[in-house]
Image: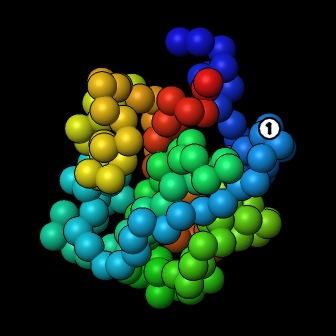
Amino acid sequence: MPQQVVDWLLEPNSLTVRMKNTFDEPFSVNVLGQGLAKPLLADARYLNQRPYRYALIREVQLNINNQPFVFARTTLPRKAAHHLQELTHLGDKPLGEVIFSDPRLKRVGLDLAKIGCHQLNLQTQKMLEGQPHIWARRNAYQLNKHVFLVSEFFLPALFN
């Protein structure tokens, strides 16, 4: 694995801040969707949640100069969403700006993977035509005793 990829995958702090500090062009968040939905089976298992239980799912693209560099999905169990209201009304504000400013935040898990692009949402798949795999990480965070997941999928533009 190239060192550049390793550095991004293992970034311990806010990916938003890292992107803003790395690139000179404007940073923006494009919200692809947010609402109650069944989480991915692997995410439900990680959260010790039954797969048919709904969670608040937020999917965004993190852009530099309007070009997507990262696709991100937040999975917030309903009970956690009830107690972490500040995470449910972000609009186009980056999640990282909220959670990394809270001293109670703890990373309680990190998974790294090279995944097939077919595992992404259709909009992101279309951007990656001809790209068989991308690097991804799944962070488990705990805030005020509630665990939630942030999965980040690193698009090829990030490394070019």
Q: Which residue is mark 1?
A: 22
Residue at 47% in and 87% down: 82
Q: Is residue 104 visible?
A: no
- In this orientation, which residue lies closer to the viewer: 42 or 33? 33
105 versus 64 height, above or below: below
The C terminus: image quadrant:
top right
* Residue 27 position by quadrant: bottom right
For residue 106, side relative to residue 130 (left or right):
right
Local secondary structure at mark 1:
helix
Residue at 51% in and 55% down: 61
Residue 14 x %, y %: 72, 51
Residue 50 x %, y %: 20, 66
Residue 116 x %, y %: 28, 30
Residue 68 x %, y %: 54, 47
Question: Crowding at label 1, few (<14), some or many (≥20) Cα neighbours within 10 Å?
Answer: few
Query: Farthest left residue?
Result: 52
- In this orientation, which residue lies closer to the viewer: 51 or 67? 67
For residue 10, side relative to residue 76 (left or right):
right
Residue type beneath disc 1: Thr
Residue at 27% in and 63% down: 39
Q: Is residue 122 visible?
A: yes
